Image (cartoon, rainbow, N blue to C red):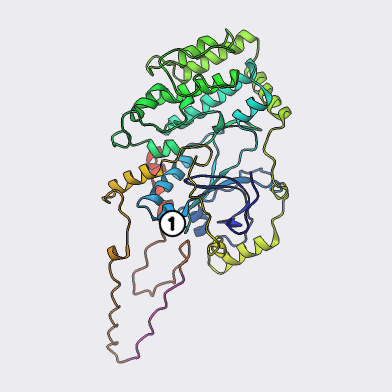
Amino acid sequence: MKPLDADKDPRVLGPFELLARLGEGGMGVAYLARRIPLDGLTDELTATYHLVEPDEGADAAEPRLAVVKMIQPHLLDKPGARKRFDREIDTVRAVVSDRVPALLAADTDAAEPWFAMDYIEGPSLHNMVKESGTFSVGPYVALGLHLADALRAIHGTGLLHRDLKPDNVVLGPDGPVVLDFGLATLIERRTSQAITGPGEAWGTKPFMSYEQLHDFPSAKEPTDVYALGATLFFALTGRPPYPEEPLLTPPNWNGVGADFRPLLAQILVDLPGPRPDLDRVEMGLRALLHEAGLTQDLAFEELRVLVAEAGLAPELPPEARSGGVDPAVRELAQRAVDVGVAPDAPWAGGTPVDLSSGGADFFGIVDTDDIELAVDAAEDGVPPGYTPTAVDQPEAQPAEPLPAPADGSPEAPAAETPDPTSYPLQPPRPPEDQPAAAPPRAALRVAERLRKAYAHSGKL
């Protein structure tokens, strides 16, 4: 976590005040942020941002921290970039579980699209094991049961994670939470598309299955089960099953107690068919609890105490703990809402963030945007590598003069072009003898999501 750069980083994105920079990569940048309480936030703007209100009973004095992710500006010039980013948001929205961060808000139509999700305060599993040591049976089983629940929720939406690893597991105050759905968004739905060649794959090799490495499009739920086993192996030993990539030989079992080996040996196999499903993994973990004379609640409490006593949660900036917002920041954001400009607009003219260094995406995800964007372009009928130019755009045609009124009255002055904003403004009421204008795009998008939700529930 690094302080904001006043010359590069915005102070506000949508209704969120940015507090610190969490990381950046080839895809974009992630910030620690908190919601700004604003007055007069219209229903339309709330719908545009897809804002999720706090649960009833939540402590209003305790600021709700968020991770705000912003797409890299230069990617917006590539065909399909916004659609791909919109898919990532839809993926985060689709998975509803205590074991994954909740989506709080998003704006895919902004000049630089962003979305916000819950910030989970705690150390990663990787840092926990490296700094505090390996797990005993209670915390080990608690970790496994929580991760199985997370994968069950992800699989229940028809997605795969494909990059479960210790760096993508945060040990929060309410238990482990799984981060990052970048690969799930990028690759799911692509099994019929030739986006990978033989031997090509994306993920983290020491924690991926043999089939994910060698036949990526064919990887299904068992590949996530393998990653779960490899992550549990790390919790016991501080290392992955294989130092570089999965092999056809058994892993090195040094440091793995005899009680843990039977279940892990079933999971860490090269063929997906024999691997247990999540229900059988859960049964094996509960059998370990029974043999150790522990209950599930005791195991969960042991893990909570272990994490709390380690004190390895990242240090937050002081303002993250305060209930108040910088008056200057709030005034600028509120003024923007009052005059009909998106809250992020006052900072839109700042120096753009230079994120061209590439490398790992937000929390270690390998950057595969070029591949995904090429597939999106092909789906949209755009040749690969095509970049729009001024030559390709249709020339603006001068507006034809309006005919003079039949009754000889003076012509009405031409309507002024409204200033562009990052969300639609309320249109003026049309005269009764003219058809009403089409509903705002944000309202149509919300209505479409509601229609789909009711359609799936069988109530519509």
Please state if 130 lies on the left or on the right of 183 as rendered: right
- Residue 260 coordinates in the image, percent (x, y): 56, 11
Residue at the spot 69% in from the left edge and 43% down from the top edge: 316
Q: Is residue 416 magenta?
A: yes
Category of crowding for the residue at label 1, using alpha-carbon neighbours closer than 10 angstroms: few (below 14), some (14–19), many (at least 20): some
Identity of the amino acid at label 1? Ala
Q: Name the residue tied to disc 1.
A: 443
Is residue 76 depicted above or below 145 in this figure? below
Give the x, y percent position of residue 417. Answer: 42, 74
Tell me if residue 422 comes above or below residue 24 in the rendering: below
Magenta region includes residue 1: no
Apparent side of residue 184 relative to residue 59 in the rendered image (left or right): left
In this view, the residue in front, 434 or 168, is 168
Residue at x-position 56% and y-position 14%: 286
Quick one: 145 or 20, which is closer to the camera? 20
Q: Compared to 104, does 421 lie above or below? A: below
Please name the residue shown 48% across and 28% down the image: 151
Q: In the figure, 359 relative to 169: above or below?
A: below
Place of residue 186 in the rendered image (x, y in percent of width and height, measured from the top left) = 40, 39
User: In this picture, which residue range is highlighted in magenta?
Assistant: 409-419
Which residue occupies 28% across, 34% down?
192
Task: Place residue 232 in its image quadrant.
Answer: top right
For residue 139, say whether it is visible: yes
Give the mark count: 1
Q: Dot 1 lies on which element?
A: helix
Q: Closer to the camera, 439 or 302?
A: 302
Helix, strand or loop for the magenta stretch, by majority = loop
Q: Answer yes or no: is residue 450 visible.
A: no
Left or right for 19, reference 439: right
